[in-house]
Image (tube, rainbow, N blue to C red):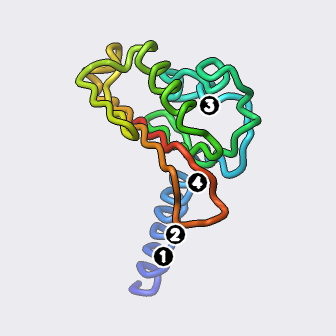
């Protein structure tokens, strides 16, 4: 009887671990850019595309991160300071103006349409990184 209970508990534990693994792996993960468009799915629909905001193809940038239904995290490599500032202007024009903060290399705001859902955008421009092979980049967090 005790052996049967141990076997059943092992099966239940295996199923629970499998469910957790599937949930973690179900996020869309993008490791190497380019990809079609980051606003195609999930919460990224609130963000202007790089091509619309900068007049450049997204294929000019290396991007990595993940996007899902409730969060969007992306690092965009190869973006210069002027393009970063243009992108901040574009996100403000698209509605990220509630309780915003803007400095030379940081921007934080809520979208007017999603303000009560507490979806906060954070942009940060990194002139340098610890990795000498990484160009300047912009970090995008929408959570």
Q: Is residue 39 left or right of residue 89?
A: right
Label 4 vs 2, first from the N-terminus: 2
Towards the viewer: 45 or 103: 103
| Closer mark to the observer between disc 2 and disc 3 | 3
Residue at 45% x, 26% y is 88
Q: Which residue is mark 1?
A: 10
Q: CA distance from mark 3 to mark 1?
A: 41 Å
Numbered badge on residue 38: 3
Towards the viewer: 130 or 42: 130
Q: CA distance from mark 1 to mark 4?
A: 22 Å
Classed neighbour count for the residue bearing mark 2: other residues with Cα under 10 Å, few (<14), some (14–19), many (≥20): few
Classed neighbour count for the residue bearing mark 1: other residues with Cα under 10 Å, few (<14), some (14–19), many (≥20): few
Q: Tell whether label 4 touches label 1 (CB within 8 Å).
A: no
| Secondary structure under the numbered disc 4 in the rendered image | helix
Classed neighbour count for the residue bearing mark 4: other residues with Cα under 10 Å, few (<14), some (14–19), many (≥20): few
Label 2 vs 3, first from the N-terminus: 2
Label 3 vs 1, first from the N-terminus: 1
Residue at 34% x, 29% y is 119
Residue at 28% x, 26% y is 100
Work out whether 66 lies above or below 113: below
Classed neighbour count for the residue bearing mark 3: other residues with Cα under 10 Å, few (<14), some (14–19), many (≥20): many
Label 3 vs 4, first from the N-terminus: 4
Q: Which residue is mark 2?
A: 14
| Secondary structure under the numbered disc 2 in the rendered image | helix
Q: Which residue is mark 4?
A: 25
Q: CA distance from mark 3 to mark 4?
A: 19 Å
Q: Is residue 38 left or right of residue 141?
A: right
Q: Which image quadrant: the N terminus?
A: bottom left
């Amino acid at each position: 009887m005790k052996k049967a209970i141990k076997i059943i508990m092992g099966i239940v534990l295996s199923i629970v671990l499998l469910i957790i693994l599937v949930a973690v792996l179900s996020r869309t993960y993008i490791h190497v850019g380019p990809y079609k468009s980051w606003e195609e799915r999930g919460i990224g629909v609130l963000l202007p595309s790089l091509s619309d905001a900068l007049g450049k193809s997204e294929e000019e940038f290396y991007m990595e991160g993940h996007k899902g239904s409730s969060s969007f995290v992306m690092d965009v490599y190869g973006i210069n300071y002027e393009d970063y500032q243009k992108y901040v202007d574009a996100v403000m024009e698209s509605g990220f103006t509630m309780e915003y903060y803007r400095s030379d290399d940081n921007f934080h705001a809520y979208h007017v349409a999603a303000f009560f859902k507490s979806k906060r955008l954070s942009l940060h421009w990194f002139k340098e990184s610890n990795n000498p092979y990484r160009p300047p980049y912009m970090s995008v967090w929408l959570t």
